[in-house]
Amino acid sequence: MSVQNFSVRSLLYGLTAIALSACSSSKYASTNKVYKQQAKSFAQTIEAFPPLNQKIDSLNEDLQSFIGTVNFGIRKPNFVIIHHTAQHSLDETIKTFTLTRTQVSAHYVVSRDGKVVQMVNDYLRANHAGVARWGKDTDLNSSSIGIELDNNGDEAFSDAQINSLCALLATLKKKYNIPRANFIGHADIAPKRKPDPNKFPWKKLAEKGFGYWYDDVLMLPPADFNGELALKLIGYDTSDLGAAITAFKRHFVQTDISPKLTPADKLILYNVYAKYL
């Protein structure tokens, strides 16, 4: 797979661009200014020649040099992590994400009425995943795009919201060639801490190619099927097996999220696990 190369100057323009949205008004002029300042600082760090603070410790300087190659690009996201805001309005969430003391953010917020607000450039790292793990990836903030859905955690997701989310996911999947398996939830990557997105229509997303869902006809697992190993191979952190089971069931079962695998749960797990092989 090839990745489009970008010049440093193009990167500077990309980093300092502000997403235009209904919420990018004078009300947020001060936070937009801070965003631009921070993006400019990051751009200057990338433009520095040679790179700053990247010398090899304990190796003599006369053994080190920097020669710029012509073959390079910028890092791209490989996962999409979906959250619910656990708040009561789009404005409340935007306020949370524009307060320095919260130290939390997301690339996009999708409101109940389907409006989409971008808050971080796709190529930058947002603070949405926290302490998390998926497979061997222990820094999901650096490898993913975070999407927050305007939802208090107990309500149904509106059709307008899901339709806008799917449009956004389709764009991200195409633009960054994100694998189908890599559209997951916050609870999947942080099963010990997070329940979101709760009561989420994962099946509808899977039908559109965003994540997996189990088949209508389920094959019986072999007698020696190891549920813990299957969860681990899918990507779940099984250091707390009960939490991993609950996260899996929150995603794929939803009617029962107890921390034990029933015979019916094992049928679903085996079917889902086989799709990751």
Image (cartoon, rainbow, N blue to C red):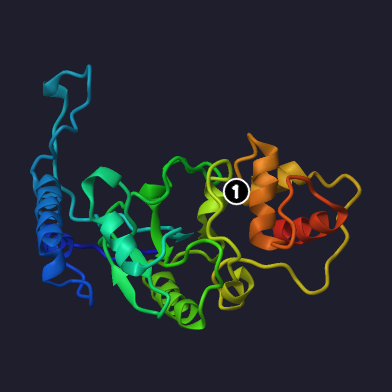
Left or right of 163 on screen, residue 195:
right
Measured from the top left, where is residue 210 in percent x and y?
54, 70
* Residue at the image position 72 percent from the left and 67 percent from the top: 214
Q: Is residue 270 visible?
A: yes
Measured from the top left, where is residue 34 in percent x and y?
12, 54
Kind of residue sitting beneath label 1 = Gly
Q: Closest to the observer: 64 or 23?
A: 23
Measured from the top left, where is residue 38 in percent x and y?
13, 51
In this figure, what is the number of numbered marks? 1
* Residue at the image position 56 percent from the left and 72 percent from the top: 156
Where's the N terminus, which quadrant? bottom left
Q: Quadrant location of residue 250?
A: bottom right
Q: Quadrant location of residue 124?
A: bottom left
Q: Quadrant location of residue 21?
A: bottom left
| Rendered view: 180 above or below 56 | below
Left or right of 214 on screen, residue 7:
left
Q: Looking at the image, which residue sits at the far right?
A: 223
* Residue at the image position 73 percent from the left and 45 percent from the top: 259
| Rendered view: 62 above or below 2 | above
Measured from the top left, where is residue 167 in percent x and y?
43, 79
Estimate how packed mark 1 is, as few (under 14), some (14 to 19) or many (20 or more) residues with alpha carbons within 10 Å.
many
Label 1: which secondary element? loop
Left or right of 91 on screen, residue 262:
right
| Rendered view: 169 above or below 266 | below
* Residue at the image position 69 percent from the left and 62 percent from the top: 254
Left or right of 144 on screen, residue 189:
right
Q: Which residue position holds label 1?
A: 235
Q: Closest to the observer: 207 or 117?
A: 117
| Rendered view: 95 above or below 135 | below
Q: Is residue 107 visible?
A: no
Q: Looking at the image, which residue sits at the far front?
A: 88
